[in-house]
Amino acid sequence: MDVAARAGALRTAFAGAGCEALLVTSLTNVRWLTGFTGSAARVVVLPDELVLVTDGRYGDQAAVELAAAGVEGEVRIGRSLAAQQDLLIEVVGPVRQLGLEAEHVSWSAQRIYTGAFAGAELVPTTGLVEGQRLLKDPGEIARIEMACDIASAALDATLPLLATEPAETSFALALDTEMRRRGAQGPSFETIVAAGPNAGFPHHRPDDRRIRDGDLLVLDFGALVDGYHSDMTRTVAVGDLSTERAELLALVTEAQALGVAAVGPDRAARDVDAACRRHITAAGWGDEFTHGTGHGVGLLIHEAPWVNATSTDRIVAGVVVTVEPGVYRGSLGGARVEDTVLVTTSGCRPLTKTPKDLACLPSAPTTSRTG
């Protein structure tokens, strides 16, 4: 990843935001700018300098991580919050217009900064770093794709367990463990395993219900690799489905394919949502599609651009997004299918490679590879 070039690219946005320097307080943005992975830091991006202020736990770590990322920056250590504040005041010193990350600064912090930086005009900024983070460089794409591959391999390894009719909690634990075993730092988020009527809840938390013949089984999970996330949902047909459940799964799978086909450079994100939503609505299930179609993926599992009916975002080449329509109806259960895709100059490239026609029998698990 070309982390070293990021501060320079960020500075090109300062004039338009009305500031000459930026105080970065979001730890996600700190990591993206510097490579620092600790839990406490603030960064001042000056016109020709970058200074990271942290506490005594992270002095050596910050120096090592910035050097490893090729970032030229100074690390300053304050052993108390007051000492760190004094360091920030010293660094900001001659700055006349200091940008603050409006979405990440609390009212209390803003009041403190107003008193501390009395010589500077504090300028609220929105999305300066996030705007730079939208486009993923080759190193970021490689990490996201590796996370996708680990998640896919973990699912392949754990699907045979469905033959034993495991509890949702047991299957979730097995899936998370397998991702770690294959090199993930951990799951990207709390793994969703929702079977039968539980699949009717989009964000069901696994419980002790056993996965049984006739269930629609929604699996929504991802792996975390070097800070970067993956996100995938597959709905498994367990045993013999009722006609209505089979039709529901087919409908959602068709809608998801239409959404993926709608992804391309310089397109309105809401048009991707519309491609999925039209198909589901035409089949009479529109009211049961209760969430947006997707979101960006990177250092956060949910980040811009937002793919939903009211989004004003556009998707461009180099952005990574998900496409994940779903339909949910009470005791019938539900179905959701999701891929993480890289937007290219000609369309998109799926980073999620697991097939979508997954089926298993409680006594003899099988994975179809025809889809």
Image: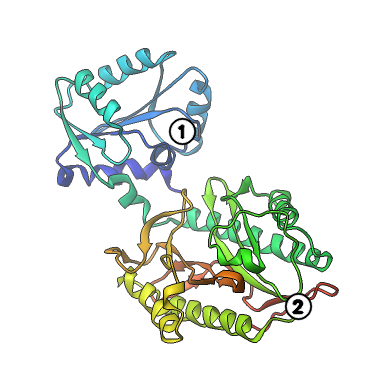
Please give the label number shown on residue 101: none
Question: Considering depth in this image, is 85 or 168 the residue closer to the camera?
Answer: 168
Residue mark closest to the camera, 2 vs 1: 2
Dot 1: element: helix
* Residue annotated with mark 1: 66
Q: Which residue is located at x 47 percent, y 57 percent?
A: 138
Looking at the rendered structure, the kind of residue marked 2 is Gly
In the picture shown, does residue 83 fall above or below 226? above
Image coordinates of residue 180 in percent, x first then y, are 69, 48
Looking at the rendered structure, the kind of residue marked 1 is Leu
Q: Residues within 10 Å of mark 2 (few under 14, many from 20)?
A: some
Question: Considering depth in this image, is 59 or 323 the residue closer to the camera?
Answer: 323
In the picture shown, does residue 38 fall above or below 315? above
Residue 167 visible: yes
Image coordinates of residue 250 in percent, x first then y, are 57, 83
The colour scheme used to paint the residues is rainbow
In the picture shown, does residue 86 fall above or below 359? above
Q: Which residue lies most toward the front here?
A: 331
Q: Does 188 sit left or right of 43 as displayed?
A: right
Residue 218 visible: no
Q: Which residue is located at x 50 percent, y 35 percent?
A: 37
Q: Which residue is located at x 53 percent, y 57 percent?
A: 144
Dot 2: element: loop
* Residue annotated with mark 2: 239
Image coordinates of residue 211 in percent, x first then y, are 74, 65
| N-term mark: 2 or 1 | 1
Q: Which residue is located at x 53 percent, y 82 percent?
A: 251
**Image quadrant containing the C terminus:** bottom right
